[in-house]
Image (cartoon, grey):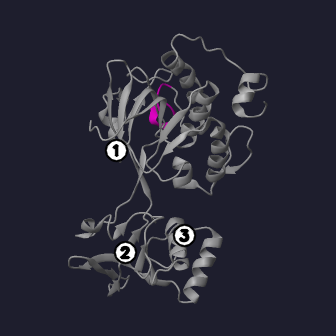
Amino acid sequence: MERSQTPIETDALIIGAGPVGLFQVFELGLLGVQAHVVDALPFAGGQCIALYADKPIYDIPAVKRCTGRELTERLLDQAAPFKPTFHFNQTIDALERHDDGRYALQTSTGTRFVAKTVFIAAGVGAFQPRKLHVEGLEAFEGTQLHYRLLPDADLRKQDVVVLGGEDSALEAAIALCDSAAQSVTLIHRRDVFQAEAATLAQVKALRASSRLRFVEGQITGLRSQTRLHGLVVTDTDGQQSTVPLDSLLVFLGLSPKLGPVAQWSLDMERKQLCVDTETFATSAPGIFAVGDINTYPGKKKLILCGFHEATLAAFAAMEIITPDERVQLQYTTTSSKLHRALGVSS
C-alpha cells in the first residue's frame, strides 16, 4: 500500500453514503463513535439519489411518502449532530490488516485511513458513470472528456457538447447556458427526454432562444489530431454531421460495480458478503456489512432491513472499539446522555 500521506485514524470507517450508510453514522453516533464515510459518488444518497432521486418511496416506517432525495436529506439531518466526515469521489482500493487488528485502507485518490472497524454499506456496488465507447475517445478523458460537470472547470469561451437525455444531462446543459460558455450543444439519440417538468420547460425555452442547440443522433466518430475538435454524429436516417467542440460532457447514467471489495478475501455468495446475523460481521474480524451488499438466509433487500442491520452492527462494533467498556442500551426518549449528544437538551 502506497504511503502517500499521514493516515487518518478513526474508530469507524463506513464505505458507502447511501441510506444505510447514513443511518450507520447515526447509530454509531448514539454510541459515542464519530465516523468517516467514503463514497464513489460526489454526493450522499447512493442508489436513492443515483437512480430514484425524485421517485416516491412508500415503505419507510412512519413516513407515508418521500422521495429518494427527501430521504437522503432527512438522514443527513439526523446524523448531523455526530459530525461525520465525508470523502466523496473516491473508492477504497486497498485494505490490509495490521498486527494490532486495525485496518489500513487507501482510496483511489490517495486518502489513507487506519480504522478499528470497517462498515461496508456499498449497496449493489460503487456507482460509476457509463462510458461512451467511441474509438480513440478514451485518450481525451480528464482533459476534454468528462463524465460529470466539474464545479471548478473553466469552460468560459468554449464550445461545449453535452451528451444525454435525462435529468443530469439537461441540468448540466442548463447550467452551462447560464455560464460564460461560448456555445452549448445537447446531443441525444432522439428528441425525447426524461426529466422533471421544470427542467424540460427550461430546456425548451433555451432551445427556442437559440442559447441551446440540439442535435439528434448518436456519436459515431471523432475529429481529432493532438486535441479533440469535433464529433461525428449520425442521425436516424444515416446522415452524418460534424459538431465542433472544445469539451465533451457525457451523461449516460450510472452503473454499479462491486470493485475491490471482491478482492478482500471476505466470504461471498453471488457477489454478496456473507454475514453473521447476530452482529452483521463478515468473515474478517472488525469488518461489518450492512444493506444490499450482504446476504444471509431470509435476506430482504429493503432499506428498513438495512437500518436494523446497521443498529446491530454498531453495538457489535463497540466490543472492538471499546473492549473494556460495557455498552448499555439507552433510549432516545429518556436518556439525558443521548439528548445531549443529539443537541436536544443542555
- Neighbour tally class for label 1: few under 14, some 14-19, many 20 plus, Cα within 10 Å: some
Residue at the outermost bottom position: 209
Where, by quadrant of the figure, is residue 171 drawn? bottom right
Q: Amino acid at mark 1?
A: Gly
Residue at the outermost left position: 225
Q: Is residue 4 visible?
A: yes
Q: Is residue 193 visible?
A: no
Q: CA distance from mark 3 to mark 2?
A: 16 Å
* Label whose residue precedes the other's in the sequence (1 or 3): 1
The percent coordinates of residue 120 (x first, y second) are 45, 34
| 140 shown above or below 60 | below
Q: Would you say 275 lies left or right of 246 here?
A: right
Marks counted in the figure total: 3
Q: Amino acid at mark 3?
A: Glu
* Label whose residue precedes the other's in the sequence (3 or 2): 3
User: Magenta part of the protein: which range?
Assistant: 289-297
| 107 shown above or below 181 | above
- Identified at 66% across, 37% down, the residue is 81
- Neighbour tally class for label 3: few under 14, some 14-19, many 20 plus, Cα within 10 Å: some
Disc 1 + disc 3, Cβ < 8 Å? no
The percent coordinates of residue 192 (x first, y second) are 52, 76
Q: Secondary structure at mark 1?
A: loop
Q: Is residue 294 magenta?
A: yes
* Label whose residue precedes the other's in the sequence (2 or 1): 1
Pick the front one: 268 or 75: 75
Q: Residue under label 1, please give it.
A: 110
Q: Residue under label 3, please give it.
A: 171
